[in-house]
Amino acid sequence: MDTTVLPDNPDLAWDIGEGIDRDRAVDFIMQFETTLCVYSASVEQLYSTYNIFFPREYHRRMVILPDPGAFHDTFNGVVPEAVIMTGLYIIPGELIGESGLYLANVKKDRTLGDRRIPFETGMRAILRNRPQDDPFLPVLAKGDLRGFEESWPVLHMHRVKLAELSERSELDRTNIRNVVTEKLESLFISQRKPPTL
C-alpha cells in the first residue's frame, strides 16, 4: 500500500494534535482498532473493520482504512443525526496515576472533571441504566482524538441513537447494536489483567 496517499474521505484522516506525544497517541489509539467502530458523517457510513496507520510522511496524521473486502462490516445510511456527542472521555490511566483505561468527564475549561472511574466499571453502569430501546452504543468520529494536559491523548466518545435510524430496517438496527456491543465487550476483555500466579 502506498502510505503517502491519504484517503479520499476526509473523515478518515485524523490530525494528531501538535501538543500530543506521537508515541503515546499511537499506543493509546491502537487499543481501539479492533474494539470500537468508526463513523464517517460525510458518507453516512459506520465501519466496524478497519486498520489504523500512522504514515511517516504525515507525521501528525492518523489514517483509518476500512477493509474493502469486509463490505458486510460497513453500515450505510447512518445519518449524522443518529450519531451524537456524549461528553464522555476515555483516558489512559497513567494520566491520573493509574493503569488501564478510565472513563472521565472534561470541564468546559478543558480540565479533567471529578468523575473518573475504571473504563469497564463505568461503561457497564451506563449500559445497565440505559432504556432497552435506547442503548448506549459508543463509536468514534473525526475530532474525537484530543490532547489533554499538554502531551496526553484522550478520546471523546460519540454514540449511535438507533431511534434516529428509522429509515434503516429492523435487521440493520439490530446488526449495528450487536456489532457495537460485541466490539465493546472485546475492549473490556482486552483491558483485564491476566491473573498473577
Image (spheres, rainbow, N blue to C red):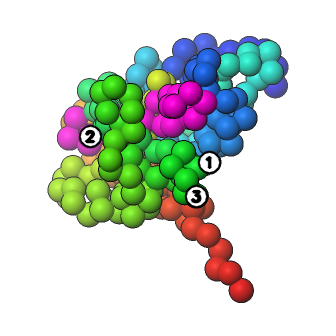
Q: Quadrant of the N terminus?
A: top right
* Residue that carries the numbered disc 2 in the rendered image: 161
Evaluate whether residue 86 shows in this view.
yes
Q: Is residue 145 magenta?
A: yes
Instruction: Please say if 6 is above or below 21.
Output: above
> Residue at the location (49% across, 44% down)?
91
The local crowd at label 2, few if under 14, some if 14 to 19, many if 20 or more residues have their Cα within 10 Å, is many
Element carrying mark 3: loop
How far across and how far down the image is residue 128, in percent? 26, 63
Q: Which residues are magenta?
A: 144-164
Left or right of 188 on screen, residue 129: left
Instruction: Please say if 157 is above or below 102.
Output: above
Left or right of 169 on screen, residue 9: right
> Residue at the location (46% across, 45% down)?
90
Looking at this view, name the residue that lies furthest to the bottom: 197
* Residue that carries the numbered disc 3 in the rendered image: 99
Instruction: Please say if 131 is above or below 112.
Output: below
* Residue that carries the numbered disc 1 in the rendered image: 31
Q: Earlier in the sequence, mark 2 or mark 3?
A: 3
Instruction: Please say if 10 is above or below 36.
Output: above
Q: Which three-letter amino acid code belongs to the residue tagged 2? A: Lys
Element carrying mark 2: loop
Q: Is residue 55 magenta?
A: no
How far across and how far down the image is residue 107, in percent? 31, 33
